[in-house]
Amino acid sequence: MKHERKIVMVVNQVKMEDEDRLDVLFWLSRPVSERLSEVSRLRKNYFTWSDGEFPEKIEKVVHQRKL
């Protein structure tokens, strides 16, 4: 006898403002070294995707959003 498995779609609706705040709070809870490492990884992925290569020079500027 074969058992059928069903996958149920689950959706949680949240306001973008709430989600943004949770994201900021999460990253603020992480060590600075981890945050910088993730920013570097995202930059490399973005530039490689958009330009095909990572630029030799990148301006080192960090902007922090207010909660």
Image (spheres, helix red, strand yellow):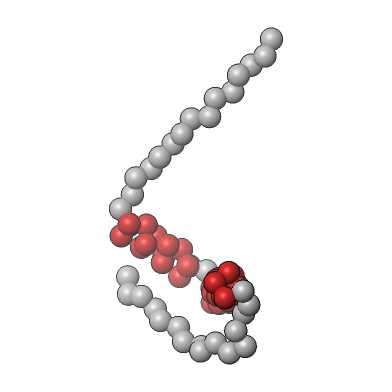
Picture quadrant where residue 42 is located? bottom right
Rendered residue at 58%/69% (across/down): 49
Is residue 26 something that shows in the picture? Answer: yes
Rendered residue at 67%/14% (across/down): 2
- Quarter of the image with the C terminus is bottom left
Is residue 29 rendered to the left or right of residue 57?
left
Is 59 in front, or is 14? Answer: 59
Reply above or below: 25 against 39: above
Residue 65: % across, % down: 36, 75
Rendered residue at 39%/60% (across/down): 22
Is residue 31 something that shows in the picture? Answer: no
Picture quadrant where residue 10 is located? top left
Residue 43: % across, % down: 55, 75
Picture quadrant where residue 50 is located? bottom right
Q: Residue furthest right?
A: 1
Rendered residue at 46%/63% (across/down): 26
Reply above or below: 22 against 14: below
Is residue 66 rendered to the left or right of residue 48?
left
Q: Residue furthest front?
A: 51
